[in-house]
Image (cartoon, rainbow, N blue to C red):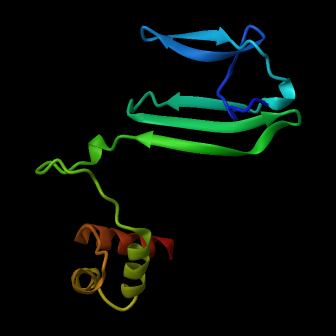
């Protein structure tokens, strides 16, 4: 391996190449000293989109070596939550933290959602984003039983 460490290379026409951008167009230039195949770590990446929502992207990456594909993959989701903005302020949707929802579920065992939400606003450091979240949590917990 060279003293430069890891480098991103592409396999084009049986040769390892570096990618260059010339006037916004990607071109591939062959490396003079071709590395040994055993020195190259192959990362395979799959990219997909949804036909229903163009803001949704999914990327799956995994390693491939002489033994075949790795048993572990990294899955990344990219979604612009444009449909989940408030209409009056155009602020992005913010989800209530899971720890807060767990505290709410425990409190709703002994009290109704309205009083739990009021207590939540006064006592918890991270309050629920709205009373609807508390009512929905109560409804979903009842559905599980």
Q: Is residue 113 above or below residue 9?
A: below
| Residue 36 left/right relative to 24 | right
Question: What's the residue at 47%, 34% (across, down)?
Answer: 57
* Residue 60, position as x, y percentages in the image: 61, 37
- Horizontal side of 51 relative to 18 (left or right) equals left
Q: Quadrant of the N terminus?
A: top right
Residue at the image position 75 percent from the left and 29 percent from the top? 2
* Quarter occupied by residue 28: top right
Furthest-front residue in view? Answer: 3
* Residue at 49% from the left image edge and 14% from the top image edge: 21
Pinpoint residue 92: horizontal percent, then vertical percent.
25, 50
How far across and how far down the image is residue 25, in percent?
Answer: 47, 9
The residue at the far bottom in this view is 110
Quarter-of-image position of residue 122: bottom left
The mark tally for this picture is: 0
Q: Which residue is drawn at 41% across and 31% down?
A: 52
Given residues 70 and 34, the one toward you in this image is 34
Quarter occupied by residue 130: bottom left
**Quick check: 133 above or below 18?**
below
Q: In this view, does 51 lie above or below 22?
A: below
Query: Residue reaching furthest left?
Result: 88
């Amino acid at each position: 391996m060279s003293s430069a460490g890891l480098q991103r290379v592409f396999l084009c026409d049986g040769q390892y190449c570096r990618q260059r951008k010339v006037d916004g167009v990607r071109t591939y230039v062959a490396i003079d000293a071709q590395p040994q195949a055993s020195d190259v770590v192959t990362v395979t990446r799959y990219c997909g989109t949804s036909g229903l929502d163009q803001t949704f992207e999914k990327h799956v990456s995994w390693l491939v070596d002489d033994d075949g594909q790795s048993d572990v993959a990294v899955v990344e989701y990219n979604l612009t939550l444009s449909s989940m903005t408030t209409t009056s302020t155009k602020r992005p949707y913010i989800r209530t933290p899971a720890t807060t929802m767990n505290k709410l579920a425990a409190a709703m065992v002994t009290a109704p959602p309205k009083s739990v939400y009021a207590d939540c606003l006064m006592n918890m450091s991270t309050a629920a984003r709205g009373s609807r979240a508390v009512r929905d949590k109560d409804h979903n917990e009842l559905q599980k039983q």
